[in-house]
Image (cartoon, grey):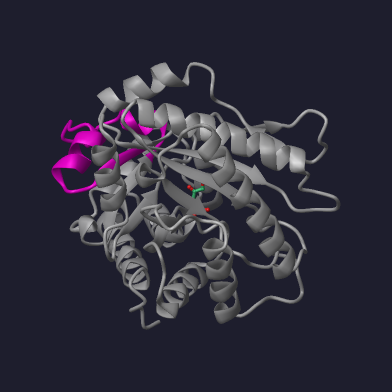
């Protein structure tokens, strides 16, 4: 796989006015989401739900690709078309979550490191064969008293860079995701400092591991106050802080940055993205790779009538994709 092909895929992922839908919840995370709305967490319900999302009519107007889970990339539509094939035929790039989740980081109480490097080369080979053209790895940085430590930030950055290098070797674009969590009562300045240190460590590690930035996408968390902070910043402050933090840490050669929603409401996630793009003069496209903020309204409606509300839920998915697609251009009007 040439760097030109990786760069082409990366650019297509952040094509103007398009973003990614993250539907890579593990079966246990899916269980939580389904339990919240009273749906049984069976394999068939997970398959049917992913089918609902991926076969939303005209989804590719605003969606360039989707991140799948291991189970999902092996599943098919009700007509028997493998999801990855269905996506390629309908103008969307299949992606795959390849990390094995977070585990307690020894020696660092309250902190986690993402695992999954063992055997990753072979798994990437298989996923490429199944149609995946990009892969995601999520690292998690907690903010709290005396954390994050430099040890945690470095360990996660190192793992992200090792994974990214393996992805490029196997022809997949790495979507590197260091998520600074919104949990806690920290203020926006603290989030800024932690995000800045995390991104700086990440890009140093990518350089050390010979990762080509032209064929890499950053999935970032926004610079935002903790959920329990009494002093919540307004939309413009979140947008300005996030863009300033990215500009000071992310090389301009990167093809694009997409955001996770991380527990923001649908409206917040769209308003923040829109405000960032309205600032203009950005070195890279800023778009979305939302999970909950793309899905939660549709999931709720579907749960009320799995047969009768299938198409209505798809209409909501399309609407959320459109709103976020417009926000990626700074053209969302609320
Ligand atoms: P949320 O948008 O729900 O945070 O999920 C995005 C994601 O892929 C987290 O890894």
Residue closest to the eye, 60 or 75: 60
Q: Is residue 192 left or right of residue 236?
A: right
Q: Is residue 247 above or below residue 75?
A: below
Q: Is residue 211 above or below residue 237?
A: above
Q: Is residue 228 left or right of residue 175?
A: right
Q: Is residue 88 located in the magenta-colored stretch of the structure? A: yes
Quarter that holds the N terminus:
top left
Quarter that holds the C terminus:
bottom left
- To which quarter of the image does residue 329 belong? bottom left
- The answer to whether residue 307 shows anywhere in this view is no
Instruction: Determine the residue located farthest toward the bottom in the rendered image.
Output: 333
Q: Which residues are magenta?
A: 68-95
The residue sitting at 42% across, 53% down in the picture is 303
The residue sitting at 57% across, 47% down in the picture is 178
Residue closest to the eye, 70 or 254: 254
Q: Is residue 218 located in the magenta-colored stretch of the structure? A: no
The residue sitting at 40% across, 16% down in the picture is 122
Residue closest to the eye, 162 or 272: 162
Q: Is residue 261 above or below residue 113?
A: below
Query: x%, y% of residue 150?
Result: 75, 43
Q: Is residue 201 left or right of residue 331?
A: right
Q: Is residue 209 left or right of residue 216?
A: right
Residue closest to the eye, 129 or 26: 129
Query: x%, y% of residue 284?
Result: 39, 62
- The answer to whether residue 201 shows anywhere in this view is yes
Query: x%, y% of residue 28?
Result: 55, 35
């Amino acid at each position: 796989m040439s760097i030109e092909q990786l760069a082409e895929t990366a650019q297509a992922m952040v094509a103007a006015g398009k973003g990614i839908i993250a539907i890579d919840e593990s079966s246990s995370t899916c269980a939580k989401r389904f339990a919240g709305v009273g749906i049984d967490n069976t394999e068939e319900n997970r398959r049917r739900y992913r089918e609902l999302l991926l076969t939303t009519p005209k989804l590719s107007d605003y969606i360039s690709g989707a991140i799948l889970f291991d189970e999902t990339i092996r599943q098919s539509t009700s007509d028997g078309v493998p999801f990855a094939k269905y996506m390629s035929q309908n103008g969307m790039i299949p992606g795959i979550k390849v990390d094995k989740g977070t585990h307690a980081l020894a020696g660092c109480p309250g902190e986690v490191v993402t695992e999954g490097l063992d055997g990753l080369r072979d798994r990437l080979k298989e996923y490429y064969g199944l149609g995946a053209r990009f892969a995601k790895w999520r690292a998690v940085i907690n903010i709290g008293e005396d954390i994050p430590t430099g040890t945690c930030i470095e360990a996660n950055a190192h793992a992200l860079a090792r994974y990214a290098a393996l992805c490029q070797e196997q022809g997949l674009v790495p979507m590197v995701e260091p998520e600074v969590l919104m949990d806690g009562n920290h203020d926006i300045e603290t989030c800024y400092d932690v995000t800045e240190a995390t991104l700086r460590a990440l890009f140093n590690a990518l350089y050390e591991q010979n990762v080509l930035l032209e064929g890499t996408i950053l999935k970032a968390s926004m610079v935002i106050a903790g959920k329990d902070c009494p002093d919540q910043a307004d939309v413009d402050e979140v947008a300005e802080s996030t863009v300033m933090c990215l500009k000071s840490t992310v090389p301009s050669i990167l093809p694009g940055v997409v955001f996770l929603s991380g527990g923001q409401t649908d409206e917040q996630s769209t308003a923040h993205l829109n405000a960032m793009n309205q600032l203009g003069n950005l070195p890279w496209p800023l778009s979305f790779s939302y999970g909950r903020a793309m899905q939660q309204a549709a999931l709720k409606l579907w749960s009320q009538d799995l047969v009768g509300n299938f198409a209505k839920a798809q209409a909501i998915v399309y609407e959320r994709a459109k709103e976020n697609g417009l926000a990626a251009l700074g053209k969302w009007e609320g």
